[in-house]
Image (cartoon, rainbow, N blue to C red):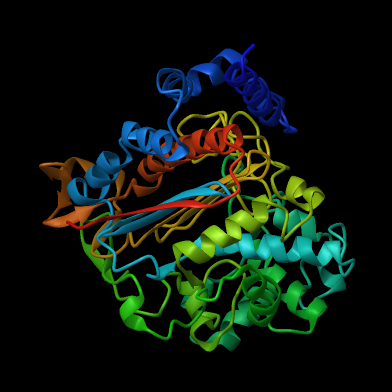
Amino acid sequence: MNNLDIKVTNFIDFLYNNQNNTNISAFKNFYSKNDYYKFLYDVIFLLQKYPNEDIIFYKEKLFNESKIIDYLNEFINEMQMAPSMILKYGTKYINDTIIINASNEDTLFDLASTSKTFTAVTILKLCENNLINLDDKINKYEPRFKNLNDFTILDLLSFRKPLKTKERLDKAKNIEEAQNILFNIEFDENADQTFLYTDMGCLVLKYVVENVTNMKFSDFLNEEIFKKNQMFSTTLNPNDLNNVADENNSMIVLNDGKIIHNNTPLGLVHDPKANILGQKNGIFPGHAGYFSNVNDMFNFASNLANNNILNSESISLLTTPLVGNEDSYYFGLLNYSKQINPSFIKVQPYLSGKTFLSPGFAGTSLCVDNLNKVYAFMAANRLNNRIYQIPVHLKNKIYTINKTRYYQENIVNFDYTPKSQDIMNVVMTLAIKYKFLENYFELKNEITYKKIIKK
């Protein structure tokens, strides 16, 4: 065997073995070694056809052949699923940044539920430091949650015990009223067992973090996560509002066809629970509230994947589905895993069993593959001047001009999330191929590429 054959064989074995590192048997052997060979065929073909070129040549070929720019132009400028988007993806040494209609790569986006990853990572960090145990009961740290006497920290991290409040938090008049509602949170015996994803556990875990650390959650994150991982722009309160992606005028359609317009001023996150619980006052409620940019989140992803934030045991637990079956979603700790149902939001099947996906409602998505060491962050302001929710019986009222859909002259993008995952699929495919090049050339220097697209 020549050097290329040896490296191809070793890399395919690497990918094949990593996909099987999962506790869900249905995800094992999903891809055969022959499937992985087909997956990498274009890389192998280039190396065989042009044996004497440098790594930049092969990388550019793969980038162009992926047609990622075409997909993004269609998604943003033709379908108008969001006004703007920024992507950053790749490996430790090879990464691309693509900016579509945004100011620059420093533009801050509302992370929404992608913020949940900060909560999961913090809890696991505290476990590593022997400050908490995942099997501890919640009331050991916060007795005001009097209805959660039988709930453990792991119950809330894994979604295996759903919660509900008797009143809506987002209808509270002030933070004190919202906290009173929250402290009476209880088990939700009528929860939809096919989709157990919820914000509620994070709202409780916030108090666990603060009582254990004797710090505001946001202060702990600033000192122990953000500063240590070069995330200097990640914030609850952006200073320069001109550099924040606009999410104002998000719309939903009611059953009677009436359109409700939501006012979200720059610097305020879309999530109403985060608003009432004090986002603008520097309070992180655990589920949403942060703004960040692609460079900060790429640093976060890279350091997670390379075990610079958590050790391998913690990452393994973070990405281990503890709930789910063939009829429902599989979840890791406050994140999404691979899924049997192809229509579900999911980690792509060719990635390792230690990959997680953390999408945010406002348009962000973070994907980290800890074993293959590839990662991506997608940021878009999908809610700005868009209808994001419409009743099923009114979908026949949607009309299309070119590739943009409208309802009463307003742009509709209610299926942004699944369509954005198609983009994530393309960039994570590229990232795996970049990883092969990184290994093949034994790369030790960073190769970066930035593409700016203006409408």
The C terminus, quarter of image? bottom left
Going 47% across and 76% down the picture, which residue do you hit?
171
Which residue sits furthest front? 52
* Left or right: 388, with 441 as reference point: left
Image location of residue 143, percent across then percent down = 82, 77
Which is nearer the eye, 103 or 347? 103
User: Who is closer to the viewer here, 115 or 199?
Assistant: 115
**Left or right: residue 87 compared with residue 193:** left
Image quarter of residue 144: bottom right
Task: Give the percent coordinates (x, y) of residue 401.
Answer: 9, 44
Q: Is residue 130 shown to the viewer in this render?
A: yes
Determine whether 220 is above or below 383 in the image. Answer: below
Residue 268 in the image, given as x and y percentages of width and height = 41, 78
If the image is split into quadrants, where does the N terminus sit? top right
Give x and y (percent) for residue 257.
20, 56
Front residue (pair 354, 205): 354
Task: Please identify the quarter of the rendering in which residue 203 is found.
Answer: bottom right
- Residue at x 11% of width, y 56% of height: 409
Viewer-nearest residue: 183 or 328: 328
Q: Residue at x 64, y 54 (%)?
A: 334
Task: Tell which residue pokes out farthest to the right in this image.
Answer: 130
Q: Is residue 398 visible?
A: no
Residue occupying image coordinates x 72% and y 76%: 207
Q: Is residue 106 above or below residue 116?
A: below
